[in-house]
Amino acid sequence: MIRRTELSAKTTRLSVAASTTIERGAAVSVQADGYVAELTAGEKFAGFALETVDNSSGADGDLKVTVQYCGAYELTVASVAITDLGVAIYASAKDTFTTVSTSNSAIGKLVGLINGVAMVKIGGLE
């Protein structure tokens, strides 16, 4: 589950990679060529998509996606406990989150845990 909450939300528009569809709510990363796509583990986390963008028939940069790169999100994070407050959170895919750093993308810090749902302060593009 990914749910956005309002906490100093900052947004920007980024150029989408060729032959790419980005779903609303997906974690987004910056590829080596500077264009964005749904997150691939190990790439720079850009933020969460606020809209769905279908550039499946387009070239690099034909379309842009709005992403939130700062704020707080409620995320399902594997194996977190209240004693983990302040630990770094990583993504291994557009919708898979963990405390394991190996080969994953840093996305933010755990700032709360409510009924097993993690509150994560994200820090893409910062």
Image: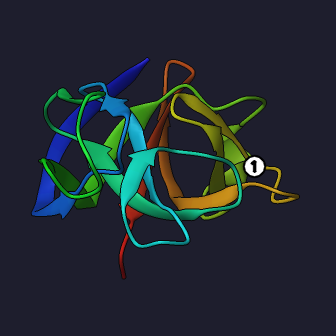
Residue placed at 83% from the left, 51% from the top?
100
**Could you say which is closer to the camera, residue 106 or residue 93?**
93
**Could you say which is closer to the camera, residue 119 or residue 50?**
50
Residue 2: quarter of image: top left
- Figure quadrant of the N terminus: top left
Residue placed at 52% from the left, 45% from the top?
39
Up-down relation of residue 32 to residue 16 (above or below):
below
Q: Percent from the top left, x then y, of residue 76?
A: 55, 25
Residue 80: quarter of image: top right
Specify the color scheme. rainbow
Determine which residue is flagged by label 1: 99
Residue placed at 30% from the left, 24% from the top?
23
- Badge 1 crowding class, 10 Å Cα cut-off, few under 14, some 14 to 19, many 20 or more, is some
Amino acid on which disc 1 is placed: Thr
Q: Residue furthest right?
A: 102
Up-down relation of residue 79 to residue 15 (above or below):
above
User: Is residue 59 found left or right of 18 in the rendered image?
Assistant: left
Tell me the element at label 1. Answer: loop
Q: Percent from the top left, x then y, of residue 8?
A: 12, 64
